[in-house]
Image (spheres, rainbow, N blue to C red):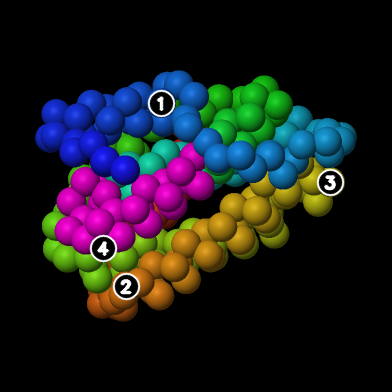
Amino acid sequence: MNHRHFTAADNLIANLDNAMRTMFGQPHITERPNPAQGLAEADMSQTEKRHAAGLMRVNHAGEVSAQGLYSGQALTARLPDVREKMERAALEENDHLDWCGQRLDELDSHKSLLNPLWYCGAFAIGAAAGAAGDKWSLGFVAETEHQVVRHLDSHLHSLPPQDVKSRAVVEQMKQDEAHHATVALQHGGAQLPAPLKKLMGLTSKVMTTLAYRI
């Protein structure tokens, strides 16, 4: 079977399409169903509902960032198998993006108004990580996903106990993120220096604080 060779222009158009879909449209998703499908809506106070929406908005913004990160890394990754892993992970992250978006609609809330900033910033970071070398690019994925897992754990403790729909989405996201981290390490991801891990954590803190409110 002949495989089409994609030019720089083709890749640019594909990345622009992905960016527009991520921030403003409908992302490409896998065949997996929404884990909250069929679950009953919780009886929550307005305060609980706003809090749940804030957390899901943070999660949605995180998935916007993940799309930028993986797209940037796939653009600069040197080895084809690494590029394919980035693209597959990005597709699975699109499921999370879609599920969080649906949950925000159900909670009568909005997505982060800063999503273009999250996407563009993460794209630049991902492209830089990819250009540094595949082992560092994959190491960056692994550390990002480890931090996301811890972040999702905190949400499971913070979400209203009766909000089973949000919890179902967050639980599945947590499983997927842990898997992405494992795959990245299995394919040669390097351990990042401690100062870089700390910087990543501080950057994440800024994003989550702003996305919860805006």
Q: Earlier in the sequence, mark 1 or mark 4?
A: 1
- The amino acid type of the residue labelled 2 equals Gly
Q: Which residue is mark 3?
A: 162
Badge 3 amino acid:
Gln
Q: Are marks 2 and 4 in contact (CB under 8 Å)?
A: yes
Query: Of the residues shown, which amino acid type is indicated by label 1?
Result: Arg
Dominant SS in magenta = helix
Secondary structure of the residue carrying tag 2 is loop
Q: Quadrant of the N terminus?
A: top left
x, y percentage for residue 148?
49, 59
User: Which residue bears the numbered disc 2?
Assistant: 189
User: Quick check: can you spot residue 57?
Assistant: no
Does residue 93 belong to the magenta stretch? yes
Task: Say left or right for 39 vs 18.
Answer: right
Q: Residues within 10 Å of mark 2 (few under 14, many from 20)?
A: many
Mark 1 vs mark 4, CA separation in Å: 24 Å
On the image, which quarter does residue 14 sit in?
top left
N-term-proximal mark, 1 vs 3: 1
How far is disc 1 from disc 3 in space, using C-alphas? 32 Å
Determine the CA span between mark 1 and mark 2: 29 Å
The residue located at (42%, 39%) in the rendering is 64
Residue 78 lies, in percent from the top left, at 17, 58
- Residue toward you, 213 or 53: 53
Q: Earlier in the sequence, mark 2 or mark 4?
A: 4
Q: State which region is magenta.
A: 72-94
Q: Which mark is residue 75?
A: none
Residue 21: assigned label: 1
Q: Is residue 24 visible?
A: yes
Specify whether 169 is left or right of 70: right
Give the residue pinned by disc 4. Answer: 137
Whole-percent x and y of residue 113? 42, 26
Label 2 and label 4: CA atoms lie apart by 7 Å
